Image (cartoon, grey):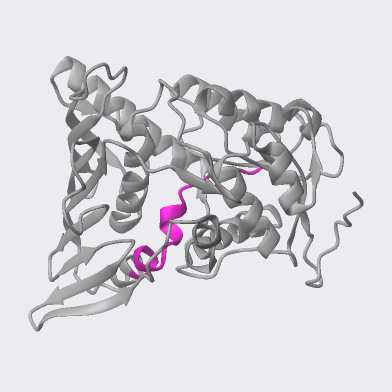
Amino acid sequence: MDIQAEASIPGVKRIRFGVIGSGYMGRTNAEAIRRLDQTAALVAVCGGAEAPELARLYGCALEPSAEALLARPDVDAVAITTSPHLAATEGIWAIEAGKHALVEKPVTTSLDEYDRVMAMATGRGLILAMSHFQRFRLNNRRALELIRQGAIGSVATVQVSMPYERVLKPFFYEGGVKAKPSETGALGPTLNGAPHAIDLVRLFTGAEIRQLTAFSRSFIPGQKVEDTTAALVEFSSGAFLSIFVSNALPAPIFPDDHFRFRIMGSEGLILLDPYDELRIADKNGWRLASKQEPIDYQSAATAFGDVRMQTYCDQMQSFIDTINGRPARAGQVTVATAADGRAGLKACLAMFQASREQRWVRLDS
């Protein structure tokens, strides 16, 4: 495969990608790259049982291993979508091979290992970015815009609810169900979901976490990791966050509560559902600020359709712009940095520590 590095946009380098991991997020990143054909090209994929099918669907090379993919001189950057026990090692390999990397969070469950990958990327002048895709959803971007405009005054409190059903629905691949969510044995809902909420609240408040306390428990018999966490988090601005995340619900989730933010400002309120409606209230009452079209996960055709994929295309384009050194416009949301990813991982690990030790844990010391 001979893909030229020149893009269809004058003066912009076309970034040539490899995708490591062929599951749901592997295909998501491959699809985003395909849609951005003026600024990106998919060269090769590897990893996982679906890798041959992924290579066939997207007309790219199939490599037998991450090492082989990273050795290709025609790969400028990689999207790493494997589980944390592999992603940190693959991230190090990518940096050593001189590739920029967009990695699914949390990359690793070790802060020391995360710092090693981040330091390597910084030392070599490479972009290490985290897939905090929620910052690119329509309603979330609009909420951030309203907050930055002062529509609700200063953010005082945020409540976040992230309940999931005990039995996860299978993810779809082309032609039907081929891959189901894996039982990694390493990640519960806290590390899987809470970093997205932490990332958004850091954006909404413009502040960092000062301290937190939490309870983490396992309510599902035989569960190897926590299935439920409730935490109280204080930010350097004085704002505080309460967050509930669980995949132990024995029945369908609470109505209209899949992922919900209740934000109280000094002068107004925001009710945010990233997958439905964003509403804002002030002294004149409630009004609709934006609405996300529904995402249909019932087939590959819709799960990888325009509505869901817009978020990932925007994230991928921001990653490409960062590689190319193209500055973001004022107020524009950009791909999450390695430091952003570290903040989410550090917060989650502190929640586990607070629960074990039954105390507040400071993060700003």
Q: Which residues are magenta?
A: 125-142
Q: Is residue 13 left or right of residue 247?
A: right
Q: Is residue 113 left or right of residue 34?
A: left
Residue 302 visible in the displayed image = yes
Residue 55 position within the rendered picture, expressed as x and y whole percent measured from the top left: 75, 45
Is residue 132 magenta-colored? yes
Front residue (pair 179, 292):
179
The quarter of the picture where the C terminus appears is: top left
Q: Is residue 38 left or right of residue 28?
A: right
Q: Is residue 359 above or below residue 347?
A: above
- Tell me what residue is drawn at x 55 percent, y 61 percent: 301
Q: Is residue 305 above or below residue 83?
A: below
Is residue 126 magenta-colored? yes
- Tell me what residue is drawn at x 29 percent, y 30 percent: 363
Residue 146 position within the rendered picture, expressed as x and y whole percent measured from the top left: 30, 72
Residue 10 position within the rendered picture, expressed as x and y whole percent measured from the top left: 81, 72
